[in-house]
Amino acid sequence: MAVEIPKPKHGFRREMSFMERLYLPAIFKGMRVTIQHFFGHRWTIEYPDVIPVAAPRFRGLHVLKRDEEGRERCTACLLCMYVCPANAIHIEPALATPENQDDYTEEKYAKVFEINMLRCIFCGMCEEACPCGSIYLTRDWETSDNDIDHFIYGKDRLMESEGSPLLFKE
Amino acid sequence: MNQTTLTLLIDAGKIAVILGCTMGAVAYTTFAERRFAAFMQNRIGPNRAGPWGLLQPLADGFKFMFKEDFVPEFADRFLYRLAPIVAFVPALLLVGVLPFGPDLVIGSQVIPLQIADPNFGVLYFLAIASFGVYGVIMAGWGSNNKYSIAGGLRASAMMISYEVSMGLAVVGLIMMAGTVHMSTIVGQQDGFFGWFIWKQPLGFLIFVVTTFAETHRVPFDLPEAEQELVGGYNTEYGSMQLGLFQMGEYAHLITASALMVALYLGGWQFPGLNLLENSPILYALAGLTVMAVKVFFIIFVFIWVRWTIPRFRYDQLMRLGWKVLLPLALLNILVTALVILI
């Protein structure tokens, strides 16, 4: 048996009351809201003057850590290179010689360690894969540059050391 | 120096000063609009050029100057070039009859703070104000662009429907004042409750709504509806020509606000201002200040409304114009006539 659905008297739209059809009360209500915002808080961060600090767990630019004795933690195991989903990491390992052995934790070290920041998706998987606690993602996020070649970060910019442009900021 | 030369010099000086002030006000109204819009959206707005961004209008002007002066292919070059001028000039002509303050008396010289005070002031204003729409229509036709022509047609249709109600709303005021002489109308509004807004509240309301339409501002900015018409009549324009359109629009806004103040809000009159009547220069300056503050307040309300409510649909606009405002304006005339008769 078919049941008849009763239709609203004026279609599905409610008839507006007289006050609503005047429009003016609604407009004044709206103006009250905007004037509250006029005197309200300004959310703009004036970027070059005020640099916002990212959250501690923010995944920004990478840093290669040193251990307590100032030796490079990276042993060129290539795990980060293999785990990287964007193929952004390029490592060339080398064997340490007796002369420079003091700089490295093991006898193998990364002669070249490059991260292409245009490929990198900042997923943090290299950080998770690293068995030596060498690579970390910092909260530094100011990556813009005018030259495309500058986006390939070498050891000079990634390695944590005094005078290098990228010190790990806590 | 005889009296004729002196009068000529004074008039030339008045024209220069008042036009200069209007242009400056136009520049800073654009700035105020952007800044207040930002405040209402919890932003800061342009604040990098000069202290508090006060040089922003200058920067905008320079930017316009250095842009390419482009005329689209198949455009009507003559109309296309002429349109911004036709849109801009009438808006400036309007300042000619606006009373900005009481007479300035220096020695034996009486200087009315008004460029010209013809005895048909209000009629002149209403006549010239509707000229601005020709620029919009010419721009729409000359651009050879379907969005532009749609904007131009909307502007003309809107002008026809709202000009009527505006004129009729003013008729009620003219009946009460008994004159269309601008400075007499202002002079009649003595004391706070002498303002015509209290005697003509309905007329004032209709006048405000139609002024929004007349100056093409939200909620009646259909000729330039960015979302539907990609800028409407000024879609094809760039460089200083676009700048002229915008300046014309803001000049019109300023003059329309000044007219509203002169007709309904007592012009330069303010309760307590008569105390200064003994020192004419101070009196004139105080009158100018009061006028400027009132005009600024009206402009602020325009900006405030613009960033509060959305645009009307075209059919809603027409219905409001013909079926609501026009009968209300006629009713206003009828009631005013009855009150005057009794």
Image: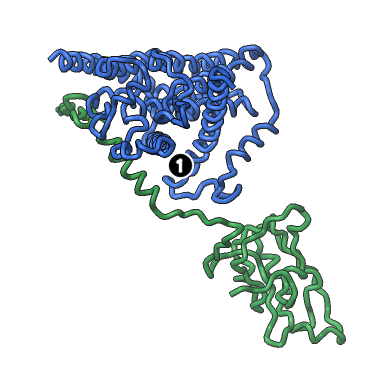
Chain colours: A green, B blue
Q: Name which quarter of the figure residue A29 lies in.
A: top left
- The residue shown at (66%, 79%) is A132
User: Could you say which is closer to the camera, residue A10 or residue B296?
Assistant: B296
| Residue B253 percent across, percent down from the top left | 45, 28
Please identify the quarter of the rendering in which residue B170 is found: top left
Q: Residue furthest left?
A: B342
Would you identify the image quadrant in which residue B101 lies? top left
Label 1: how many Cα within 10 Å (few below 14, some 14–19, many 20+): many
What type is the residue that disc 1 sits on? Ala
Residue B45: percent from the left, percent from the top? 51, 47
Q: How many marks?
A: 1
Image coordinates for residue B87, horizontal then vertical, percent: 54, 19
Can residue B59 be seen here? The reply is yes
Q: Nearer the viewer, residue B6 or B83?
A: B6
Position of the N terminus of chain A, as image quadrant, is top left
Identify the residue at horizontal 60%, vertical 23% (top origin): B236
* Side of B179 relative to A170 (left or right): left
Q: Is residue B198 above or below residue A124?
A: above
Residue annotated with mark 1 = B37
Which residue is at the front of the view, A49 or A147?
A49
> Which type of secondary structure does the marked residue at label 1 adopt?
helix
Q: Chain of mark 1?
A: B
> Does residue B148 show up?
no
* Residue B189, percent from left and from top: 29, 28
For the point 27% across and 26% down, which residue is it? B196
Question: Which residue is located at x 64 percent, y 14 percent?
Answer: B75
In the rendered image, which quarter contains the C terminus of chain A? bottom right
Residue B283 vs residue B174: left or right? right
